[in-house]
Structures are given as C-alpha cells and as structure tokens.
Image (tube, rainbow, N blue to C red):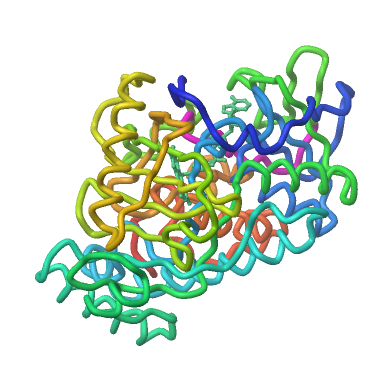
Amino acid sequence: MELYKGNRYWPTTWQTNSMSLSRTNSTCDVAIIGGGISGMLSAYVLARSGLKVTLFEQGRIGNGSTSLNTGLIQYMSDDLLIDLAERFDLKTARHFYWASFEALDLLEEIAVELPQNPQLRRNNSIYLAADASELSRLGEEALAHQAIGLPTRLIDERELADRHHLRATGALMTRRDLELNPYQFTRFMAETAMERYGLVIHEDIQVRESDIDLNRKILVHGEITCQFDRLLLATGYAPLPFVRSHLPQMKLISTFACITQPLAKSRLIPSDCMVWESARPYLYFRSAMDGRLIVGGADEENTRLSAGKAARIGQELLHQVQQRLIEPSGLIPEFTYEAIFSESGDGLPYLGPHPHHPEVFLLHGIGGNGTVYSAIGAKLALQFAQGRLDPAFRYLFPGQTRTLT
Ligand SMILES: Cc1cc2nc3c(=O)[nH]c(=O)nc-3n(C[C@H](O)[C@H](O)[C@H](O)COP(=O)(O)OP(=O)(O)OC[C@H]3O[C@@H](n4cnc5c(N)ncnc54)[C@H](O)[C@@H]3O)c2cc1C
C-alpha cells in the first residue's frame, strides 16, 4: 500500500544502512512482523526482558507510517474522555485515559536508555476550543481528567493570548505530554536492542500469510526459517488477511503535513507547547528541536494521494496557523506530504490476542494517538509473552465487546 506522496522530513534527520544481520535460521520466544514504532517498541521491551526476539520488516525499519508521524505524543486522544464514557462506560474511559498517561512514561524511560536522545522532551499541549459551546464541553473534560488525577486544566482567552500568544476563546491544557522524532526513536531502539539484547532483525522480507504455519509455530520465507512460541503482528495499516476481519472498525483516510524551514529561536512558535484543536477537520502544530514548525491536519475521506495537493494544502495549513497566532510570523514550507492515516470508528486501538489463534498477538495502534497506543501495546505484548495478560484491557482486544468486564 502506498502510504504517502510528497517529501518526508524525518528520514533526512538520520541516515543509516540496512540493519539486517543474518539470513540464518532462528528459534525464538517471539517472532514479530512489522518494524515500525509498534513492532519495535514491543521488540525492545520483550528483548530487554530477556526474551529471544526475531523481527521481520518488508522494507527498512521505521519507514512506514512511523516516518510520517509528526510526533505529538499526548495522553488525551481525539475522542474526549467524556465521549468515551458515553460510548462505553465511565470505568472503561477512565482506564483507557490512565493507561495512555502511563504509556508516556514507558516512552521516556526507553529514550533515556538509548545512546542518543531521539529529540524527545516533555511538553504541554494546548487543545483550542473551536467556540463557546466547545469550551463548556472542555470544562467538563477538565473535571473528568482531574477526577482521576490527570494534570489537565482549563485556560481562558486571556491566558492563551498573554502567555502562549494564541488566539481562541479558551483551551484545555494537558501537562507532561511528549514530543519526539519517531523515526530516530525507532531506529535507535532497533540498533540498541540488537547490540544489547540480541534482537534479530530481517529487513526486506515481506512475510505472506502462507509463510506462517501456526500449528507448527514456524515461519518460512525463502531460505529463512524461524521457529517461534508466539507471534506478534504489527503491520500497521496493512493487516494480514487472517487479521483484517477482526479489525471491523478500521478505516483509512488521508491527512496532510507540512514542515517549515527552521525559524530563529526568538521567532519560534509556539515555543512552550504543542497545539491542536476541537474543530474538525483539525489543525495541529508544534516546533521541533531544530526550530522548524511541524504542522498537520486537514484530514479527509480520500485515499488517492497527491504530492501537488500536499504542497497546496501545506500552504493552507500554514495560513491557518497564522490565524491562530497573536503575532503572525513568516513561515516557509520545506517538506509537505499527504499520507494515509487510519482510525478506528470507536476511538480505541486494537491490541490483544487474535480471537481464534491464542498464540498470535495483534498490535494495531490505530488513531490520532497511535504512538501512545503502540506503547500500551508493548506493555501488553510483554504480559502476553509472559503468559500474564491483564484482563482489565479486554476492551481493547480484537473480537471482544469493547467494554470493561
Ligand atoms: C501524517 C501523519 C501524522 C501522524 N502524527 C502522529 C502524531 O503526531 N502522534 C501520534 O501518536 N501518531 C501520529 N500518527 C500515527 C502514527 O504514525 C502511527 O500510529 C504509527 O506510526 C503506527 O506505527 P506502526 O508501527 O503500527 O505502523 P508502521 O510505521 O506503518 O509500521 C508497520 C511496518 O510493518 C511493515 N509491514 C507491513 N506488512 C508487512 C509484512 N507483510 N511483512 C513484513 N513487514 C510488513 C511495514 O513496512 C511497516 O514498516 C501520524 C500518522 C500520519 C500518517
């Protein structure tokens, strides 16, 4: 599947060669298919815990959707806690938000272990209210967060203008979120896990369903044979055929991103927070550590991608950013792309065992908060591999009724 059209930014920040070590046969505790941030987070966590892990990637590590991810990593998702509480129940919504909050710690903990910082830092997020009625909903949302101890608060128009130089009727601020370069993060995890924890990686291997024999727990592709105890599937927006029907809500749409030329430090906007909004389709922006502004949004129900359109929409997104700033600043686009993005209709990712194959675990962290979901998935994958999967997460399992038991 073609994932993007246009030119990407992250791969220009880290150049490396192929990571494949060997084409030999292996026996492992866990085989993983898919070397994006989902597969690699799980590979890292599992290998670090002492398990033998072999990972297969059809292209190069981190070059799928991970290389397009704009790196706003937040505990609040596109679906508000109060909306999830209505769709499912309060217990489920609270559990999910708290798991998302805790997932940030895992990402930070891993980043600290890597030999270089993958441009990860804690940052606050500001979620702008589209209008006065949205603002009153955000007030309810702030209370729902505070009731479970999340560091969220409402900010008014004046504080937005005076402290953050942003224009809106008000906003929600979520504190201690993360920003990161997902491409570097994934590549650094791969290199570190190979070196320190014996992770085996095979790049340029597209695993077909017919390569996998679940009865014999063996994967055979050309001259490579891998005997495994458990299998993790993290193939992003391209689930294998025997998985697809268990992700009934998965929907593909397109989204746009624009990365500007670097701005001088004094002109950085916003310098102290990441910004997104309650309007739909939404706009979001943040500054990267090298002074570029990363802008995204304008999601639409169309999967025919176009580089020309990406350049045009990129300009429009920058114009929209200027409208939300008290003091507009000169922004020159350097990278623009249109990309495939996946959402689940009910706002929850699919993370859990395959309904008919208990030795297979599915990691499809789809949705706007994909990175946080990949991190929740890595924790669950470790529990799964150790035979102690927490049933409290049953509402995320594919094929389950999506409510807490
Ligand atoms: C423009 C854009 C902006 C985004 N911004 C954000 C953001 O700010 N914050 C956030 O949290 N999320 C964001 N996301 C979502 C995020 O990119 C995804 O959630 C995340 O990258 C998914 O990671 P993944 O590992 O599941 O998928 P991928 O990165 O696509 O990895 C899957 C891998 O599996 C491999 N693969 C597939 N099939 C096979 C096979 N049969 N055999 C072997 N290998 C296979 C692919 O080559 C690929 O490398 C954004 C997405 C887009 C498109």
What residue is shown at x 39% (from left), y 52% (from top)? 285
Q: Pick the residue in front: 124 or 333.
A: 333
* Relative vertical location of residue 211 with respect to residue 228 in this rendering, above or below: above
Question: In which quadrant of the rendered view does residue 167 lie?
Answer: bottom left
**Depth check: 171 or 380 in front?**
171
Q: Is 282 above or below relative to 305?
A: below
Residue extent of the magenta highlight: 227-238
Q: In percent of the image, x 56 and y 65: which residue is there?
A: 103
- The reply to whether the magenta stretch includes residue 237 is yes
Which residue is at the far top?
222
- Residue 79 visible within the image: no
Residue 2 drawn at (x, y percent): 46, 20
Tell me: 52 left or right of 79.
right
Image location (x, y in percent) of residue 21: 87, 28
The quarter of the displayed image where residue 78 is located? bottom left
* Quarter of the view holding residue 87: bottom left
Q: Is residue 328 above or below residue 250?
A: below
User: How many marks can you see?
Assistant: 0
Report whether 198 appears left or right of 58: right
In the image: residue 111, left or right of residue 270: right
Residue 322 x %, y %: 28, 51
Quarter of the image for the C terminus: give it.
Answer: bottom left
**What residue is at 39 percent from the left and 31 percent from the top?**
340
As for residue 112 lying within the magenta part, the answer is no
Given the current orientation, which residue lies at the most extreme left position? 133
Q: Is residue 244 visible?
A: yes
* Residue in the foreground of this view, choosing between 172 and 19: 172
Where does the image place residue 118, in percent across and percent down from the top left?
68, 52
- Residue at the image point whose x is 70% and y is 66% from the top: 109
